Image (spheres, rainbow, N blue to C red):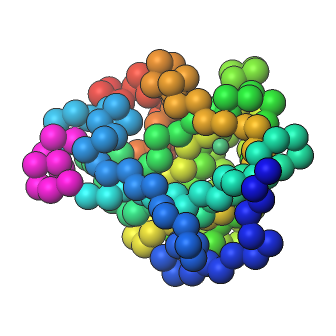
Amino acid sequence: MPLPPSELRYLSSDASIEGVVSNERWLSGLRDSFVDQAAFDAALSAGDVMVYRVASVESANGEGQLHYGLGLLMPGKIGKEYFHTRGHIHAFRPAAEVYICLQGQGLMLLEHESDGSYEVVEMTPDRVIYVPGYTTHQTINTGTEPLTYWGVLSSQAGHDYEFVKVNGFRHLIVEENGKPVVINREDFWK
Ligand code: ZN
């Protein structure tokens, strides 16, 4: 079974890992992630942009192994909605994850599917976040510079994007009066 190298070099300034190709998500592929479709169309007609990318190291697989990745989420907004990742829940629901923020200013939305509760936690370079199992999670850049972070999780976790596509998030973080606020997604147009 192939294992990743015992050490890899990374560049925190642009969230790249030496020898690892980043998987890029561009605005044109993220329509489902934004509520305000008119603002989305306006932004896209001004030009497609990369919203986020992740360099993932997933060569070790099987019981006890870890996957990890370095993410970079650009600053920006679609109308009132900040740039964010699509978000996911782990295919293996009990799998937890640790996020370590390196640079920037953001939030992570955690929706605990087991009891319906949610949390919004800050992502700043002095914070580490524990995402428990059975939790849908999404990263939001509320700042003016790229938000970069490590994510470390079980190799058995997997990413269930379909769950988010079908069920969505129940909350949304939008800018009001220059500040991020959390609203119920269904209250967006009120
Ligand atoms: Zn995850």
Which residues, given as a range, are shown in magenta?
Answer: 40-48
Q: Is the magenta stretch mostly helix, strand or loop?
A: helix
From where the camera sits, is residue 17 visible? yes
Give the image quarter of residue 135.
top right
In this rendering, is residue 75 above or below 103?
A: above
Give the residue at x 89% y 46%. 64
Q: Is residue 110 left or right of residue 86?
A: right
Q: Which residue lies furthest to the left in this view?
A: 45
Give the residue at x 40% y 55%. 24
Q: Residue 41 magenta-drawn? A: yes
Give the residue at x 82% y 41%. 62
In this rendering, is residue 161 above or below 163?
A: below
Q: Position of residue 20 (x, y in %)?
A: 55, 67
| Nearest the eye: 14 or 158 | 158
Q: In which quarter of the image is the C terminus?
A: top left
Q: Say how many tags the image has.
A: 0
Q: Is residue 157 left or right of residue 51?
A: right
In this rendering, is residue 145 above or below 3?
A: below
